[in-house]
Image (tube, helix red, strand yellow):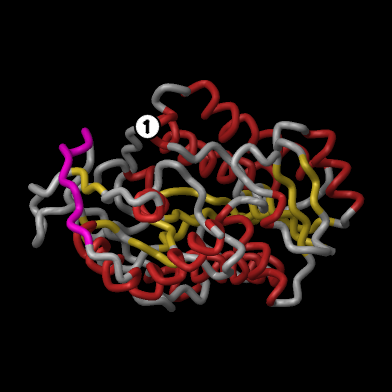
């Protein structure tokens, strides 16, 4: 009996795999390595190099490894790029999820934890986002994640599928020196890449309606997030009541300016960020309540901002050497 983690060779998926291992749960990884790294998969964990669109391979993996549940992390995750590549985004995030659900149904696997996103909310008009905040996705990526949630909901009505979707906010940090965020678009990798290259990090806009003029976002540590996937899986295994969606948020925001100050303290590199123009569509503030997840999924902010920055910096430096 094992849980299959799609996208388990990626930054978030690899942390989920380690969290399952730490709890003594058997796990299998399926990843096409389009953005993941085989080196992120722990020794001894079965690894299948394949895309979730390959239904036959999914069925074979389910039977060979006696899979009883799925954590679906795989997907095309670049919101900005999704605007230029909508068809690719829908194929990887919607068609692939439908293929996965069909294979699960054929194999009589009835539990899934889905990796969703804060992108389903678009630009919320509230200081604190809850699961009931209206959904207005503003990119094909955000739309594809919302459709993924709908697919789970509708399949549950049809077949009794047990499911939950975890809406991530800004995932940062590292729980293992061997694992790091390698996205070319995320804030922390961009900051550290600049510093390691001898360049000055950049802030996009300093005239927002926030205390220091820079965007306020909800940053959560990847290891804390991974633990909630295990808690969700255990809840599904036990047949316990579970909500269809949970926000994994801090309830409190951090500005880009505050992150830059923390980076200066952690790295010991003194720099003054370059100030660029605002990015179109960036809201002043997005912060979410994690109260429901704290109630059901052992969710808590187990790391300070400084610890988030320190762990991310350490893993970036380890990869550079």
**In this figure, what is the number of numbered marks?**
1
* Residue 193 on image: x %, y %: 41, 50
Q: Residues within 10 Å of mark 1 (few under 14, many from 20)?
A: many
Which one is nearer the viewer's eye here, 127 or 235?
127
Query: Is residue 273 located in the magenta-colored stretch of the structure?
Result: yes
Q: Position of residue 101 (x, y in %)?
A: 69, 41
Which residue appears at 58% of the width and 40% of the height? 75
Q: Residue 93: image x %, image y %?
A: 56, 35
Residue 206 vertical placement versus 106 (above, below): below
Camera-side residue of 191 and 207: 191
Where disc 1 sits, the SS reads loop
Magenta-drawn stretch contains 305: no
Magenta stretch, main secondary structure, is loop
Q: Residue at x 16, y 37 (%)?
A: 277
Please name whichever residue, 317 or 30, is drawn nearer the observer in this view of the structure.
317
Question: Image quadrant for the C terminus?
Answer: bottom right
**Where in the figure is residue 296, as x and y percent of width and height?**
50, 73
| 84 on left or right of 206 | right
Please name the residue that numbered disc 1 is placed on: 139
Direction from residue 252 to residue 205 in the image, left or right: left
Q: Which residue is at 27% across, 57% downward?
A: 217
Which quadrant: the N terminus?
A: bottom right
Could you say which quadrant of the image residue 102 lies in?
top right
Q: Residue 99 falls in which quadrant of the image?
A: top right
The residue positioned 63% from the left and 49% from the top of the image is 72
User: The magenta stretch spans which residues?
Assistant: 271-280
């Amino acid at each position: 009996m094992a849980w299959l983690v799609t996208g388990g060779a990626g930054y978030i998926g690899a942390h989920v795999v380690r969290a399952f291992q730490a709890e003594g749960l058997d796990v299998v990884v399926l990843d096409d390595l389009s953005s993941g790294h085989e080196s992120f998969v722990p020794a001894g964990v079965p690894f299948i190099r394949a895309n979730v669109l390959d239904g036959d391979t999914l069925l074979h993996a389910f039977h060979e490894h006696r899979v009883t549940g799925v954590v679906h992390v795989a997907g095309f995750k670049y919101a900005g790029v999704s605007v230029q590549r909508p068809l690719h985004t829908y194929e990887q995030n919607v068609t692939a999820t439908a293929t996965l659900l069909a294979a699960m149904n054929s194999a009589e696997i009835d539990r899934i934890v889905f990796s969703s996103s804060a992108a389903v909310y678009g630009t919320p008009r509230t200081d604190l986002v809850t699961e009931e905040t209206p959904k207005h996705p503003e990119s094909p990526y955000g739309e594809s994640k919302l459709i993924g949630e709908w697919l789970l909901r509708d399949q549950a009505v049809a077949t009794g599928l047990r499911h939950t979707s975890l809406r991530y906010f800004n995932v940062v940090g590292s729980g293992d020196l061997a694992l790091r965020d390698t996205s070319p678009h995320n804030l922390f990798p961009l900051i550290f890449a600049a510093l390691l290259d001898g360049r000055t990090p950049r802030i996009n806009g300093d005239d927002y309606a926030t205390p220091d003029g820079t965007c306020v976002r909800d940053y959560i540590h990847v290891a804390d997030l991974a633990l909630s996937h295990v808690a969700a899986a255990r809840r599904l295994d036990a047949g316990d009541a579970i909500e269809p969606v949970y926000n994994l948020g801090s309830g409190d925001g951090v500005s880009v300016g505050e992150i830059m100050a923390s980076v200066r303290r952690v790295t010991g590199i003194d720099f003054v960020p370059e100030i660029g123009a605002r990015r179109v569509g960036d809201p002043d503030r997005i912060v979410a309540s994690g109260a429901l997840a704290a109630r059901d999924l052992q969710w808590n902010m187990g790391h300070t901002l400084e610890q988030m920055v320190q762990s991310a910096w350490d893993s970036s430096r380890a990869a550079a050497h």
